[in-house]
Image (cartoon, rainbow, N blue to C red):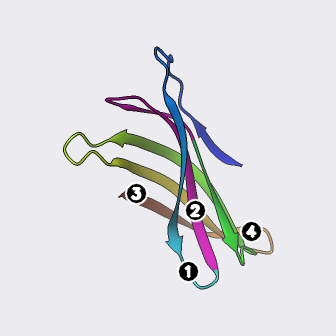
Amino acid sequence: MNQIVFIYERDSICNVETKSLKLEDHLTLDIEMFATFCRDQNNIKAIDSYSEISGFVTGFDWKYKSAEIYKNNTSGKIEFNVNGLLKWNIFGITIYNQSKTFKGSFN
């Protein structure tokens, strides 16, 4: 599993939420991200995030490298910046590494 865990001290009671979002949607291959965070009255704190590929994944390998999840104080939305590496393989040999960066917000 491609998981990133954020460490913080929980100093108050908060509501834990999990959101999912399709980062890339192709005919044969999708990249999806899931994020769990703690929301209190004024802030959010990311707990963990993971990403996976689905569909026709033969010949592909997805490595989730980094994630930044935060609350935009201007819009109030939960936004993210994530990076990963999509490896293209033939017979188990990597022939191409495609760096992927995604930015956006959760609804």
Mark 4: secondary structure: strand
Q: Is residue 64 above or below residue 58?
A: above
Foreground disc of the pair 1, 4: 1
Numbered marks: total: 4
Residue situated furthest bottom in the rendering:
27
For mark 1, what is the residue?
Answer: 26
Q: Are the residues tagged 2 and 1 within 8 Å (C-beta)?
A: no
Q: Is residue 1 above or below residue 41?
A: below
User: Residue at 58% of width from left, 62% of height from top?
Assistant: 32
Foreground disc of the pair 4, 3: 3
Q: Are the residues tagged 4 and 3 within 8 Å (C-beta)?
A: no
Amino acid type assigned to the residue bearing label 3 in the image: Asn
Foreground disc of the pair 2, 4: 2
Using the image as rendered, state which of residue 17 and residue 85 is in the foreground: 17
User: Residue at 37% of width from left, 40% of height from top?
Assistant: 70
For mark 3, what is the residue?
Answer: 107
Disc 1 crowd rating (10 Å Cα; few below 14, some 14-19, many 20+) is: few
User: Residue at 27% of width from left, 43% of height from top?
Assistant: 72
Find the magenta span and give its range.
Answer: 29-48
Amino acid type assigned to the residue bearing label 1 in the image: His
For mark 4, what is the residue?
Answer: 93
For mark 2, what is the residue?
Answer: 32
How far is mark 2 from mark 1, CA to CA? Answer: 11 Å
How far is mark 1 from mark 3, CA to CA? Answer: 21 Å
Q: Are the residues tagged 1 and 3 within 8 Å (C-beta)?
A: no
**Picture quarter with the C terminus:** bottom left
The magenta stretch spans residue 40: yes
User: Percent from the top left, x then y, of residue 33?
Assistant: 56, 56
User: Residue at 36% of width from left, 58% of height from top?
Assistant: 104
The magenta stretch spans residue 4: no
First of labels 1, 4 by sequence position: 1
